[in-house]
Amino acid sequence: MAHASDGRSMEFKLPDLGEGLTEAEIVRWLVEVGDVVAVDQPVVEVETAKAMVEVPCPYGGVVTARFGEEGTELPVGAPLVTVAVGEGEAASGGPARERGAGDGAAPTPAAEPPAAEPKPEGSGNVLVGYGTSEAPARRRRVRPGRPAATGASGRANGRVRAAEPVGGAVGTAEPVDGPVPVISPLVRRLARQHDLDLRELTGSGPDGLILRADVEYALRAAAAQGGRTADREAGAGGASAGAAAHAASPSDGTRVPLKGVRGAVADKLSRSRREIPDATCWVDADATELMRARTAMNASGGPKISLVALLARICTAALARFPELNSTVDTEAREIVRLDGVHLGFAAQTDRGLVVPVVRDAHARDAESLTAEFARLTEAARAGRLTPGELTGGTFTLNNYGVFGVDGSTPIINHPEAAMLGVGRIVPKPWVHEGELAVRQVVQLSLTFDHRVCDGGTAGGFLRYVADCVEQPAVLLRTL
């Protein structure tokens, strides 16, 4: 993702962030043009559909250019920064500052070095699936005939953004011949789905690169223009009809981009509803003894045990008895794949939205280890430091929505898993205990399961075992 533009200037590009991610949004720049950076020093914080990531630069030297403003969405392979590598004046920031007059400015070309001179090497240690010393450079193929772009804004000479509202009308640029500067296949697919000619757009990315935001902007502008046209046509038939058309216009209201974590959640939940024939069963359980057991554990000294860790321990024991629910469905092969280990996801609400960190090998952990891992992942989630690997690969999810003060819910399965256990709040309620009415700590447990992997008997057996362990924690001793 980096190459030498001359013997001393290295262009560092947005690396492959792993897990099939093809783009990221710039959240915050950590360096300015003219700053001296060390090898593997983070230079920018980006947000993907999975997590917030600080991207380290594999080269040391002076930053001579930055590409993209905060809030810009860049595809993998797009330039991030240019670094003047070397000692002396370049490292001190003298001439290097002159070469980078501002964000996105290209460095002044230096004399081409002799062919035998070795190129500077990076650390080879940036992110998952990416190494600077061996990774091949990804190039955009541009054939002759592409109009030249000016500056780092990437806006081509003599062109305007297609469908941009101007003075109440919508202007359309003339289509141009030649290749379209698009890297992301998602952008091309979005344009195809809406019959949009990418040649009519001017990209806001580096070197005129067309981003998804450019396509979405053009579609919104076209929709707004269509709404205004409908209003005018309706007005010809009567004022009331025109008012009704305006009231129904999709351009009304506040628009919130469905992207980042929110967009990823929306896509995953929609896919779950489309593909998985789910069913839900639930039961109330007396959690009084479980709460007493936790109090006794924490009174004996040592690290405190969390309630969610005890619930997780109960889940792993139940999955050992009912392995059908720790599985996934291979739709192409028409096979149910029962998984050996339990990688337990848990829902965590953050300022960026709902995320589901994964506790690896939860079946092999005790309550103390589970408590520590839940705490670590929760803190990382709130700070936006979760890696893509910590947000993927789950086989079963535990959702403790009781923290929001609600009793019950019908969880949506975290695709491609086969089940999710939901836990409501634990509150004092009247309960018949040992033949007498008493006030007990009661919780509602909900299990949503994929009806393809098992029938109601298996799901009911799993949920009943979980409830029995909540009511009588000693039941767990049989599996310890």
Image (spheres, rainbow, N blue to C red):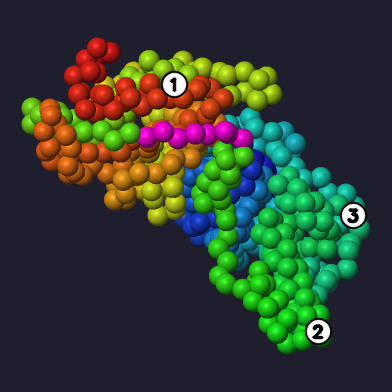
In the image, taking residue 297 as reference, residue 461 lies left or right, namely: right
Query: Which disc, if any, is residue 178?
Result: 3
For residue 105, what is the image quadrant? bottom right
What percent of the width, then of the height, locates residue 185? 73, 45
Kindly report the secondary structure that dominates the magenta region of the rendered protein.
strand
Q: Secondary structure at mark 2?
A: loop
What percent of the width, then of the height, locates residue 293? 14, 28
Quadrant including the C terminus: top left
Which of discs 3 and 1 lies nearer the camera? The answer is 1
Regarding residue 124, the answer to whether it shows in the image is no
**Residue at the bottom extreme, as displayed:** 239
Can residue 280 be found in the magenta stretch?
yes
The magenta segment: 275-282
When the figure is inspected, residue 66 is found, relative to residue 114, above or below; the finding is below
Query: Which disc, if any, is residue 237?
Result: 2
What percent of the width, then of the height, locates residue 470? 24, 28
**Label 3 to label 1: alpha-carbon separation:** 62 Å
Residue at point 51%, 43% (across, down) = 50
**Residue at the front extreme, as displayed:** 435
* Label 1 sits on residue: 457
Residue at point 77%, 86% (across, down) = 238
Which of discs 3 and 2 lies nearer the camera? The answer is 2
Can residue 162 be found in the magenta stretch?
no
In the image, taking residue 466 as reference, residue 178 lies left or right, namely: right
Give whichever of discs 3 and 2 has the lower sequence position: 3
